[in-house]
Amino acid sequence: MKAHTPGRRKPKEPRGIPEMPARLSIEAAILEVLQQQDRMRIEQLVRALPGYTWRQVFNAVDVLRRDAALTVTQPDQLSYRVSLNRAGHC
């Protein structure tokens, strides 16, 4: 049995850290699209970001909404409209 020598083993990265740059890039992409459009339905936003899945866009929109960067409204029972929150976005 080998003796344990400190410092030789690479520490494990905390879970979630590798995903953070992707999350930031999708959020930046959403903000960029919405700066070009005043507001759009979430389905249009998903189509404008073909490199991401519907779920990724939806989750990022939810994070941005909670951070007060976006406003999400429901104009009818079947759709959601997303727009920049001008008061919370510089």
Image: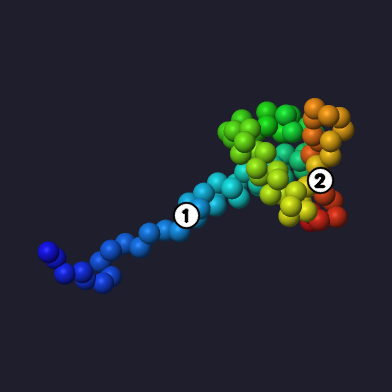
Q: Quadrant of residue 40?
A: top right
Q: Residue furthest bottom?
A: 6
Quick one: quadrant of the C terminus?
A: bottom right
Q: Is residue 44 left or right of residue 11?
A: right
Q: Please say if the residues under marks 1 and 2 sit with CB atoms less than 8 Å apart.
A: no
Residue 77 placement (x, y as % from top left): 83, 29
Residue at 12% over, 64% down: 1
The residue singled out by tag 2 in the image is: 71
Residue 72 placement (x, y as % from top left): 80, 42
Please say if 88 is above or below 30. below
Decide which of 12, 41 is in the foreground and name it: 12
Residue 66 placement (x, y as % from top left): 74, 52
Q: Is residue 5 left or right of residue 35?
A: left
Decide which of 29, 19 is in the foreground and name it: 19
Is residue 39 visible in the rendered image? The answer is no
Decide which of 41, 34 is in the foreground and name it: 41
Residue 54 placement (x, y as % from top left): 63, 32
Is residue 36 visible in the rendered image? The answer is yes
Please say if 68 is above or below 74. below
Residue at 38% over, 59% down: 12
Residue at 72% over, 39% down: 33
Amino acid type shown at disc 2: Thr
Please say if 20 is above or below 41. below
Q: Secondary structure at mark 2?
A: strand
The residue singled out by tag 1 in the image is: 15
Q: Secondary structure at mark 1?
A: loop
Tell us which disc is closer to us: 1 or 2.
1
Name which of mark 1 and mark 2 comes first in the sequence.
1
Please say if 18 is above or below 5. above
Residue at 73% over, 55% down: 67
